Amino acid sequence: MVHLALFSLFAILCVAGAINLLAQKHPIASALSLIVVMGSLAAEYMLLGAEFVAVIQVIIYAGAIMVLFVFVIMLLNAGEEERTRGSRIAIIFGIPGLLVGMGLIAWVLVRHNVASGLVKAGALPGTPPRIARLLFRNFLLPFEVTSVLILIAIMGAVVLARRERG
Amino acid sequence: MIPLAYYLLLSAILFACGVMGFLIKRNIITIFMCIELMLNAVNLAFVAFAAHWQNLNGQVFVFFVMVVAAAEAAVGLAIIIAVFRTRETLNVDRVNLLKL
């Protein structure tokens, strides 16, 4: 009962933030609603028992990535979104495609019995030691490859954002 | 005890919001935020299925998705800065040199 109440509270917060993200005209308001979405998603992870994921959701997503977004919004002095006629192709094919995709997901949820399973609060405790054991044994190679990926991303960001001197 | 379907439904709604924003928003930074929203929706599905199957691999995958998202955000925002420097605009409709 408490689980359902907490889930509903954070789910409503999440969806409200996502809709506000679409409704706002100013990018900084959109960024703040995205932070609300990410914070309530961290609470949902905590309800599922994924402690480590919930904490890095707050630190990396709501912290580092959103700070980067807000920093760029301020750096570029982004103002209100100007309304221009959007791409007709995107609207004509995108909205029906989205509806078809949602219908497909709903159909799978109704028909397939995977989704009818029940999830307990804190069903699978993802504590740091258990995650670390997987990460440094089964997933050691992907983990090392991500360090190379981050190195390349850092160099790419520096090269792309550097001012050309001519 | 709540059904797994609730988590999947929340994930699907968030993903749909992300796709919708990607289609209707015109500001390049907001479009980029909608991509992050879609990644978050997928992460929720990963964690919910991990709890359902009692398998921690799903949570480790969320970690990798976050790392890739962080790298993508750094490079993407650098590209946005470069675009703004050459085009002086953040509106995707005005960045149309390749358009017929």
Image (spheres, coloured by chain):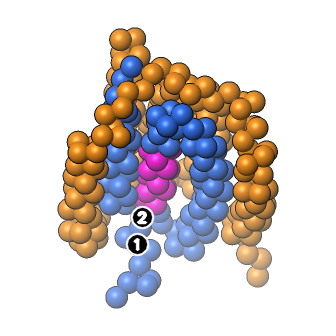
Chain colours: A orange, B blue
Residue A42 sits above or below residue A121 on the image: below
Residue A98 sits above or below residue A49 on the image: below
Locate the N terminus of chain A and report the quarter of the image it occupies. Answer: top left
Q: Answer left or right for A131 relative to A58.
A: right
User: Would residue A111 be visible to someone looking at this image?
Assistant: yes
Which residue is identified by label 2? B91
Determine contact: label 2, label 1, CB under 8 Å. yes
Badge 2: chain ID: B
Span colored in magenta: B27-44
User: Would residue B21 be visible to someone looking at this image?
Assistant: no
Q: Find residue A71 and report its horizontal and vertical position in percent.
A: 62, 47
Q: Type of residue at label 2?
A: Asn
Label 1: state its secondary structure: helix
Q: Find residue A6 and report its horizontal and vertical position in percent.
A: 41, 17
Q: Type of residue at label 1?
A: Arg
Please determine if labels 2 and 1 lie on a single subunit: yes
Residue beneath the point at 41% across and 67% down: B92
As for residue A54 lying within the magenta part, the answer is no
**Front in this rendered view, residue A165 or A56:** A56
Q: Which residue is most to the bottom?
A: B100
Q: Answer left or right for A64 relative to A102.
A: right
Residue B48 sits above or below residue A13 on the image: below
Residue beneath the point at 72% across and 50% down: A139
Q: Quadrant of residue B79?
A: bottom right
Q: Answer left or right for A49 relative to A110.
A: right
Residue B33 sits above or below residue A149 on the image: above
Q: Main secondary structure of the magenta part?
A: helix
Locate the C terminus of chain A and report the quarter of the image it occupies. Answer: bottom right
Which residue is identified by label 1? B94
**Front in this rendered view, residue B40 or B60:** B60
